[in-house]
Image (cartoon, helix red, strand yellow):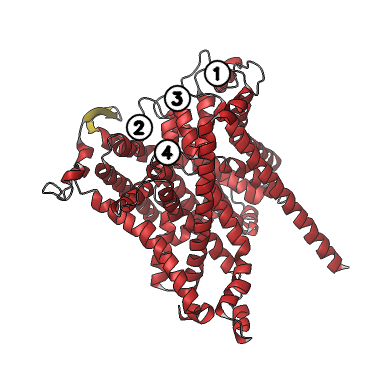
Amino acid sequence: MHKLRTTLAHLYMGAFLIYLLIPLVIMAGAAFNDSKLPSIVPWRGWTLHWFYDLFQDERMWVALFNTMVVALAVAVISIIIGTASAILINSISGRIRTVIYGLMISTILIPGAVIGISTLLMWNKIGVPPGLHLSVLGQVSYIAAMVMLLVLARLQTFDGALEEAALDLGASHGQVMRRILLPHLYPAIGAGGAVAFFQSIENFNVTQFTRGGVDTLTVYVFSKVRSGITPTINALALIMISITLLAAVWYELSRRRKERILLAGMSREDE
Amino acid sequence: MQDLIRRYGAGLTGLMVLLVAFWLLMLVIIPNITLFESSFRPYLPVVEMGGPKDVYSVNNYLKVFDGSIETSIFGMSFMVPVHIRTFFLTIWYSVTVTLACFVLAYPIAFYLAKIANPKSVPTLLLLLFVPLWVSEVLRAFAWWIILALKGPLNSLLLSLYLIEKPIRWITDYDAVLIGLVYTYILFMLFPIYNAISSLDTNQIEAAEDLGASRWRIHWRIVLPHSKPGIASGAVMVFMLSAGSLLVPSILGSTTSQWFTQTIQQWMNDALDWNTASAYAFLLLFLCTAFVSLVMWIFRVKLSDIAK
């Protein structure tokens, strides 16, 4: 009986993985189908035509460039604001901490449309026209909170006595920050930067209301899907999924290597 | 605060306070106050702004009562204003999506935390993460392909003789729900997985030894322990679904309308930013109220959620 249950659990897990991954496979597969509509049925033979069309599309390149600029800006600003917030939150306590922390967290839950419209309205009121700079500010308003959470978690394992020691030995304030605190936080800051970058790339709601007619990749894909669909979007999807998969595999391999080194180190200590 | 100044000096501390103030004031609080203020102003041509007609009123909010259509609920017909109907359907379907995500994700979370071989868990998590990194617009598009009338799903079902003629999937809200569950289920899975991971397996084994049934173990031990994770996942999925614009736009049919789409129409089609503000504020306020109510019923605090 127990065995049957375990088998069922394995089967369900397998089915769930298929459910998650099959749509991506189908979407990517349609990129090679020589059919005017994006689908894998009926199969009309292999072609690389859609990739060629995609690379010819000037608008896609502009959108891609814009996306990268926005994502980089969001990542950098979110890292700076998120790290400062985590350090600040970590050092205060009591009611004020609860209020500020609650406010920071709540930004993650605000619907993107609300963030987009409110950002546009406020900056418009003080004379800043819509455009990608507003998209950056709107996205930072909630992505900074994600970075803050990651850095805050890392701060829990920080030993404050190290800073005391450095101060006693005559280190300057800047040195304490640069040489002791920040190096401890780098893994979380790096992870936060990656999260911010990816969140920014896939953001649609905030961008849609603040962009002022300029394309980002998500907006470009959206408008292509809504209007005349050709499988060029599938070609783009395939490229993006491939990059994601490569990054994932690289991450997994480096994790396994680290684990092996760690295990090898531990067994050497045992001897 | 004193401690910060002692460690990093007044200059660096001041800089950090400024950064946080910029974030919370300029990017969060003041924009939302502006939104709130604008929502009470009339939509006027530029020349009349600040003129005698530019006075505060709740007219923008009253627009939700305009234009009724007949709706039947539980077999009874009512005349319901269109936008109110849209809003309630958005909430109702978002709740449906949240429940569906929970039912589908809970067994997976339990499996990953307690049944799967610990060595294979990182690989499984990595595989689960892949769709999360693919952008939402592409995931909705993938389902648009799958659910098309002549798409792969219908071909598969036809070739297996499970159906006789193609099913129209993209009709009413059906495809929107399928797309939303697919897009947001991982936001339910990971918090629950984290919560169950922290449960001591000995507790489950003790209950087994004392003769508790499977259901009872889940009901009395695993579920109560994972309550913060479930709450966190549910709040995320609900807010994301209710605030989604991409999925309802791509997978919606002629008879489906999401509240965010209504906001977008006011904003981008009617160019009436003030009414759009009023609607956006309604969405924010009512969703927050709804989430707070549910959290109060289940006795969960906001601080539990951000763990």
Where residue A248 appears, x then y in whole percent? 67, 45
* Residue type beneath disc 1: Lys
Q: Measuring from the top left, give residue A105's x and y in whole percent.
A: 44, 58
**In this figure, which residue is indicated by the disc labeled 3?**
B170
Q: Three-letter amino acid code at disc 3?
A: Ile
SS assignment at label 3: loop
Would you say the residues marked 2 and 1 are in contact, meaning their CB atoms lie under 8 Å apart?
Answer: no
Side (left or right) of A53 relative to B14: right
Mark 2 or mark 4: whose residue is earlier in sequence: 4
Q: Nearer the viewer, mark 2 or mark 1?
A: 1
Q: Are marks 3 and 2 on the same chain?
A: yes
Residue position for label 4? B96
The chain to which mark 2 is attached is B
- Spatial CA distance of label 3 from label 2 is 13 Å
Q: Name the residue carrying label 2.
A: B257
User: Type of residue at label 2?
Assistant: Gln
Discs 3, 1 touching: Cβ within 8 Å: no
Question: Residue at the spot x=46%, y=49% of the render?
Answer: B236
What residue do we see at 12% from left, 46% from top?
B53
In the picture, measured across the screen, residue B166 lies left or right of residue A48, that is left
Using the image, name the chain to which the residue with label 4 belongs. B
| Residue receiving disc 1 | A36
- The relative height of residue A248 versus residue B306 in the rendered view (above or below) is above
